[in-house]
Amino acid sequence: MKRVNNRILFSSPQVDRLLLGFLLRLFGLFLKRERICHVALAGGKTPIELYRMLSSQKLPWDRLRFYLSDERYVPFSSELSNYRVVKEAIGNRGRLAFFKTEMPLEECAMDYSFQLPDRLHIALLGVGADGHTASLFPGVECQDVSPKVCISRSPDGLLRLSLKEEYLNESCVLVFFLKGEEKRQALEAIIKGEDIPASRLVGKLKSYIFTDITYPLK
């Protein structure tokens, strides 16, 4: 464990198991004080094994609420759908809110806004090699739809929906999850505080980074 740029960093080859234990402890802490624990989940490939491990845990599932941090504006049946991939991994016991992408784009974003809590207890976010997180991309201006949700576009031109930077920064605890050497430069940028979307996100109480990339950096 290292403290770097107002974040606590954990680096381990067994990062999925390490993060699983950490999340279970966080769930317990928040559920001691709250009836429901609200958790944003990252999409993409990085957290899928973590979600499969989580799905097998004995948890008070009825007191946990999960939300996608972002989504591609594609049908549920698409292999690009975050909801499809995350739901399959976390299982039927996990109550996962989703973007209703069959709706017109702005209506979809607004509908999702109404599903969200006033504040997230935990925001678990991935980070791309370019430093993007959720669907907040470097150099891409988002279209505000509500105080919680915006519309974005990825470099490949695909429309996306995302939790807003301001809303994510209200999260009690914010956790970045990075795996793979291709993310090393992005990790270094976060640690140095360079101007990338991920660097601009900080939890209200604490912020963490979990990674399998060796630290100190080369």
Image: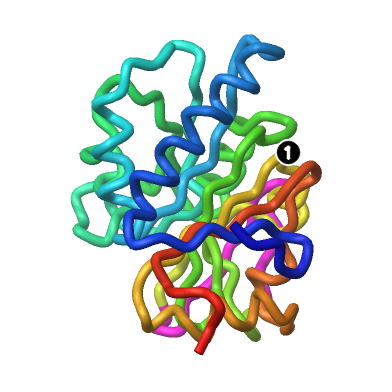
- Residue 55 x %, y %: 28, 29
Residue furthest to the bottom? 218
- Residue 2 x %, y %: 64, 62
On whether residue 45 falls in the magenta region, the answer is: no
What residue is shown with label 1? 172
* Quarter of the rendering occupied by the N terminus: bottom right
Left or right of 28 on screen, residue 184: left
**Viewer-proximal residue, 166 or 178?**
178
- Residue 184 against residue 46 in the figure, above or below: below
Q: Please state the total of marks drawn on the protein image.
A: 1
| Residue at x 71% of width, y 62% of height | 3
| Residue at x 53% of width, y 83% of height | 217
- Residue 23 x %, y %: 49, 35
Question: Which quadrant of the view contains residue 14?
Answer: bottom left
| Residue at x 73% of width, y 82% of height | 195
Secondary structure under tag 1 reads loop
Question: Which quadrant of the view contains residue 98?
Answer: top left
Residue range highlighted in magenta: 141-157
**Viewer-proximal residue, 19 or 33?**
19
What type is the residue that disc 1 sits on? Cys
